[in-house]
Image (spheres, rainbow, N blue to C red):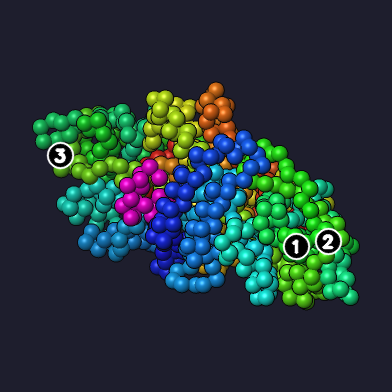
Amino acid sequence: MIEFEIPEKITGVCTVIKSVADNMMRPVSRYFDEHEHEIPWDYITFMQTATRAMGGSSMAPSEKREGPRLGFQRLAFMVEMLSWGDAGIYLDTPGGMLGSAAVSATGTPEQKERFLARFKSETPTFDAMCMTESQCGSDTSAIRTTAVLDKDESQWILNGEKIFVTAGHKAMVDSKGFIVVWATIDPKAGRAGMRPFVVEAGTPGCQVTKLEHKLGIRASDTASIVLQDCRVPFDNILGSSEVVTGKATTGFKGAMATFDATRPIVAAQAIGLARATLELLKEMLTEKGVTIRYGLPRQKMTSIEKDVIDMEVMLRSAWLLVIEAVWMMDNGKPNSLESSMCKVRAGDVVNKITQKAVEIMGPLGYSREYLLEKWFRDAKISDIYEGTGQINRLVVARQILGYRSSELR
Amino acid sequence: MYSFEPSEEQKMLIDAVNRYATSDLRPAAHDAEENKELPPKLISKGWELGVLQASIPEAYGGFGERSAVTGVLAAEAMAYGDLAGALAIGTPGLFALPVLLAGSEEQKKKYLPPVIEADWRAYTAALLEPSFDFDPNDLKTVASVNGDDYVLKGEKTFVPFAANAEAMLVYAKLDGKTAGFIVPKGAAGLKVGEEREKYLGLNALPFYKITLEAVKVPKSNLLPGDFTPVLAAGRVALAAMAIGVAKAALEYSRDYAKERDVFGVKVAQKQAIAFMLAEMVTEIEAIRLLTWEAAWMIDANKEDASKQAYLALTGAADMAMMVTDRAVQILGGHGYIREHPVELWMRNGRGFATFTGLAMV
């Protein structure tokens, strides 16, 4: 059956999230955009309480399977709505994000317990993923952070510097969270030497050294983290102990596979932002007496009508790609292609829509009195993080061409 | 629930259409275009798949139930083979499906069986008009009341198989809205152009201009139902065909790029080309989902179905142009020659911005 009915469970959740967006995010959007390193604690504590009240420890799909599998679909809808509220404040949501996604995907049961239990506490707790370094972003195999095994002490010694860590400060300073640091145990081995290590807040030798000043999503902290002879227990390497010696291990592949799950969620974030923009644009146009008529041939449309209708096509089709990707996750279908496709499209669409909206509204679009200019700034990162649009195009191309990464660079 | 998997029955139909599209339609397409003719046997073989019949209830001679989703799946598969062939096989549906959607019980019982019970015969419809800003909701062909009749006046273009049509559905403006009128063969005042129209693409299809010089039809020939669902059905059908053509172009250019050598590697290994292909496949899938959603909304009687159908076709027209243009580009000089199919697909691809009314589900 081909069907497009939003499941009731999801509609219910979205109604709740929308009121969070309306009441706890929109009213403070401008404030946290202008006060870049302040923390929206009201939103954070609210989300912590609400998530616990709903019986979860994060918004991520639970491992329980009851009824039709809806976990990733539900998450996508929730993220879309939260981002519709505020794309930056959404990134301050406590509980499992990218770091714990890696733990869930590749950790042993003991590791999952040790690291993920903290999200069930009353105190908002955060995690973060550390991959990018100053000399490499897309080319993850070029990381230089090292992990050396001290057999006597049964510890790993980490050295290096990670940048652009979303929620790095919240994970390591504002809460008793953790970061997942990608380091190499064998610099000569390239990608094959990369391993994920959990570093908990308070570990000596690990310091947040900088918070970036950004174009947008200013409510989200973007940190630089320096590791200097930072020692972590041997058991902090994610995955079982075979992960140390094996080459392309299932653990590593599992971690890479989490990107198939996280890419659509990041795309959902972009879509929420795009939707907010299109809705506000239409509201503002209506206020100015400009109506959008549907069904006309393009020869009879005004320029603004054509732009708005194109935006509607872009937005809806991009969102459907996200839904398809997460539906496939929920139904156990391999979705590397769809996951990358939806990220490509969402990144494109949110930039086109926000850029066009500012253009259409002239001086009002450019003014800080309205949120359009903020959303223009928030949008840009969507085509950059979690795999740039260009990297995702490579992934899509490899999929449809049947090429390995060595065959298409 | 969301679900993106066709039902078992739909899969069977799509498979049958796919086989026909790849084994019969596609190999015949090049010559059909050059010779400006589709072999009748080709059309009858496609007709025997029963796509139209599967949409029409038993009470009117069919064996199924109308489903826009099923129609859309079949239309994409058919157009993937060849657009002219797909449109030809679907032409009787331009008459039958609006009768099903907007006709009275009597009209359905009278007109549907002859169209679908036997071989393919030329039943057609006339919607498009030769004005640059053609608007299906603001026609220049008009209908006025004259006693117990309607009198139709105007000019239509792009009418497929008009020359020997058994009957045609002519759309005209009545009381400010678009309405459909059944016009039988040989009606007085109905003038079919002597020569076929010539177009950028679709040369295998016989299109004609028709002039309505005070054509009288009895009042009972007016389809009483609303035009909006008919237009929506036409738009998703066309969007689906655009996807089929685009898919053909994507696959052909992708396969070519994988084979062709350049600077010591395959063309497909160059980022510029790889990125084009990535964007093509992404755009196709995005518009496919938009079209499926519109078709589902039609079947589920959702309020915004016709708006969604409009958005789907708007997106599909742009998508088809982008994809087919790139397919020619990827083949380079060879793409420009009328041996590879990509130049035909590009010529056909531009038409989706205009072809309203040439397809129906």
Q: What stretch is highlighted in magenta?
A: B290-308
Q: Distance between the residues labelled 3 and 2?
A: 89 Å
Tag 3: amino acid: Lys
Q: Where is residue B254 in the image (x, y as percent from the top left)?
A: 65, 53
Q: What element carries label 1?
A: strand
Local crowd at mark 2 within 10 Å, few (<14), some, or many (≥20)? Answer: some
Q: Residue beneath label 1, please? A: A199
Is residue B71 found left or right of A303 in the rendered image? Answer: left
The answer to whether mark 2 and mark 1 are in CB contact below 8 A is yes
Vertical arrangement, residue A266 with respect to residue A217, above or below: below
Q: Where is residue A83 in the image (x, y as percent from the top left)?
A: 54, 47
Q: Which residue lies furthest to the top in this view?
A: A363
Q: Residue beneath label 3, please? A: B219
Q: Do labels 2 and 1 share a chain?
A: yes
Seen from the viewer's position, the closer of residues B144 and A151 is: A151
Tag 1: amino acid: Val
- What's the chain of the residue with tag 2? A
- What's the chain of the residue with tag 1? A
The residue shown at (76%, 45%) is: A210
Q: Is mark 3 on a helix, strand or loop?
A: helix
Local crowd at mark 3 within 10 Å, few (<14), some, or many (≥20)? Answer: some
Q: Residue beneath label 2, please? A: A230
Asked where in the image residue B6 lies, by quadrant, the reply is: bottom left
- What's the chain of the residue with tag 3? B
Q: Is residue B300 found inside the magenta-colored segment of the image?
A: yes
Q: Distance between the residues labelled 2 and 1?
A: 9 Å
Tag 2: amino acid: Cys
